[in-house]
Amino acid sequence: MPIKAFLFDLDGVIVDTAIHHYHAWKRLANELGFDISEEFNEQLKGVSRVDSLNIILEHGGLTLPDEEKRDLAIRKNEWYLELVSRMTPDDILPGVATFFSEVRKAGLLTALGSASKNAPLILERIGMSDVFDAVIDGTKVEKSKPDPEVFTRGADELEVLYNECVVFEDAVAGVEAGNRAGMFTVGIGSPDVLTLASMVAPSLDELTVDTVLEQANKPQ
């Protein structure tokens, strides 16, 4: 089927908020008496807040009651929001504006598929609230990546078939989610890491819409 829609992750594809997440999670871990590294933080990309907290607590050898975990997740998010509230359109990654201009000229539909419950705030801060035909964030899904729900919901809202979609993802869990949905996946990052993606590029700055469509529309 010809491609009709492009579905984008937010962090690491449109903007880079991973460093803000890392600083907030690191601060929380330090308050709990241990530390996390940037390398460890790679495991948290594309993962929901609750699942991220569980991974961190397991790393620190802690078992806490659900109520305390809920309070910790809220505290981390408050610290994160302090950081992202300072974001501006200057934080949009290189090549994004040009790529989205090509997407519109090609007549393709667009959706955001992000595990972040703060995605609408970030889109507002960077001036991209009106760019997407559908926005699926952490408030609209029950399962986090690598479950494909965030992308299948996006396709459903756009009223397109799953195999008519291309997913742009920087995280291993996100690529797996796109693959499980039966979508063509474009990994944004290193081919050594995103080994399961249908194709890989360092950033949207290194891609054209025509190149992606040429690859995605090839018989699989």
Image (cartoon, helix red, strand yellow):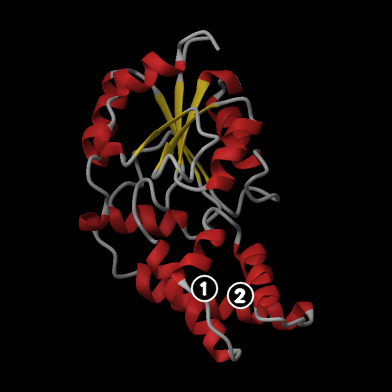
- Vertical relation: 149 (above or below) 12: above
Number of disc labels: 2
What residue does disc 2 label?
Answer: 73
Crowd around label 2: few <14 · some 14–19 · many ≥20 (10 Å): some
Please give the name of the residue rendered at 54% of the width and 46% of the height, measured from the top-left corner: 172
- Vertical relation: 45 (above or below) 50: above
Judged left or right of residue 106, residue 9 is: right
Q: Quadrant of residue 80?
A: bottom left
> Where does the image place residue 181, in percent across and percent down from the top left?
64, 30
Pick the front one: 170 or 79 = 170
Amino acid residing under circle 1:
Asn
> Where does the image place residue 207, in percent across and percent down from the top left?
29, 30
> Residue most toward the front?
192
Separation of disc 2 and disc 1 at Cα? 6 Å
Judged left or right of residue 175, residue 23 is: left
| SS for dot 1 | helix
Please give the name of the residue rendered at 48% of the width and 10% of the height, measured from the top-left corner: 2
Amino acid residing under circle 2:
Ala
What residue does disc 1 label?
Answer: 77
Q: Are marks 2 and 1 in contact (CB under 8 Å)?
A: yes
| SS for dot 2 | helix
Crowd around label 1: few <14 · some 14–19 · many ≥20 (10 Å): some
> Where does the image place residue 116, in percent across and percent down from the top left?
52, 57
Q: Quadrant of residue 58?
A: bottom right
Please give the name of the residue rendered at 55% of the width and 81% of the height, measured from the top-left corner: 75
Q: Which mark is residue 107?
A: none
